[in-house]
Amino acid sequence: DRTVREIAAGEVVERPASVVKELVENALDAGASRVAVAVENGGIDGIRVRDDGAGIPPDEIPMAVAKHATSKLDGMDDLDSGVATLGFRGEALHSVGAVAELTVRSRTPDADTGAELVVDHGDEGDVQPAGCPVGTTVEVRDLFGRTPARRKFLKTPATEFDRVSGVVSAYALANPGVAVSLEHDGREVFASPGDGNRRSAVLAVYGREVAESMIDVDHESDSGEVRVSGLVSHPETTRAGREYLTTYVNDRWVRDGDLRGAVVDAYGGQLATDRYPFAVLFVDVPARAVDVNVHPRKTEVRFDDDADVIETAREAVRAALLEHGL
Ligand code: ADP
Ligand code: MG
């Protein structure tokens, strides 16, 4: 039984960053206006995600950690018509509980107290009353502590933290109306204000120089089917890697090499060798034109009409730079 649980868990739980991604998505799905992420030792020793969202009633917490349990689907129709919420597989919490010590503590707005449930490497405890604020806190300790073969694949804490930071940054940038914060070993790394302003989120995550260099992008394809909007940096504000090119398709964070390539392309020869711009770029296409479910971790997409999306992204960034004489 343990083997089955562990294999299933492998699909969504690979490393601290993949756990953080699932927990942050759940917090956003719950309508949180604040999401506070704190990790220890790159997330290897501990992960805590606290939100002020809708919460989970005590009697529903066991459901939340059960296999294939989701409160977000009414039937297969939702899968066909594009996906309204970020999480919809109902396997994240269950998968985490199978390979770590998972604590879910929650309180709904109408309840006087909250409740908590611990799942210790697959062994589920009883729901206990717990004092806590409205919303949900999920804590994960001892990730892969009983599965050394999986633990072996983790990199150094610094590398794991870089990935955690990349995930939390991507969600903070895409959700400027939500106050998102990240703490590592007790130190605040960033905290976005949640004021709804995209530039404020960039300021919090990347700092003043990058925020001030950002140029607005907003462009539609001739067909009217594809819209590309967001922010890209001045060609002199760059980094050595591509990881600061953050892209979203229909508000879902994706890492697409072609999309990043199109953005870089739009700068022509203006970037120094091996330097890449910052981007926070949103691509909107009709739901039927994109398949977001090609990967269990849901960070890859497949476009029906690849060329049109990629070309529109390139045109969009080119037009924005041109408007600034670049
Ligand atoms: P999914 O998100 O695909 O439904 P998860 O395993 O991530 O599956 O979560 C299972 C269920 O637990 C969710 O459907 C939701 O009802 C509940 N849940 C999880 N996290 C939260 C949260 N932060 N706030 C409120 N409910 C939550
Ligand atoms: Mg989920």
Image: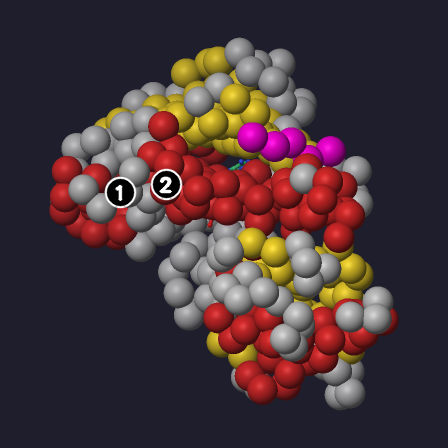
Q: Nearer the viewer, residue 305 or 316?
A: 316
Q: Is residue 191 magenta?
A: yes
Numbered mark located on residue 160 in the image = 2
* Crowd around label 1: few <14 · some 14–19 · many ≥20 (10 Å): some
Label 1 SS: loop
Residue 256 drawn above or below residue 226: above
Q: Which residue is mark 1?
A: 154
Q: In this view of the protein, can residue 200 be seen by the observer?
A: yes
Q: Residue furthest front?
A: 272
Kind of residue at disc 2 = Glu
The stretch of residues the image draws in magenta is 189-193
Q: Left of 222 or right of it: where is 5?
A: left
C-alpha distance separating marks 1 and 2: 7 Å
Q: Quadrant of residue 191?
A: top right
Q: Is residue 80 visible?
A: no
Q: Which mark is residue 79?
A: none
Nearer to me, 48 or 310? 310
SS state under label 2 = helix
Q: Residues within 10 Å of mark 2 (few under 14, many from 20)?
A: some
Under mark 1, the amino acid is Leu
Is disc 2's CB within 8 Å of ligand 2? no
Nearer to us in this view, 308 or 1? 308
Q: Are marks 1 and 2 in contact (CB under 8 Å)?
A: yes
Q: In the image, what residue occupies the spot 66% across and 51% down? A: 174
Task: Say which quadrant the N terminus sits in.
Answer: top left
Quick check: is 322 in the magenta stretch?
A: no
Where residue 93 appears, as percent x and y from the top left, is 39, 40
Q: Quadrant of the C terminus?
A: bottom right
Quick check: 18 left or right of 98?
right
Residue at image x 79%, y 38%? 195
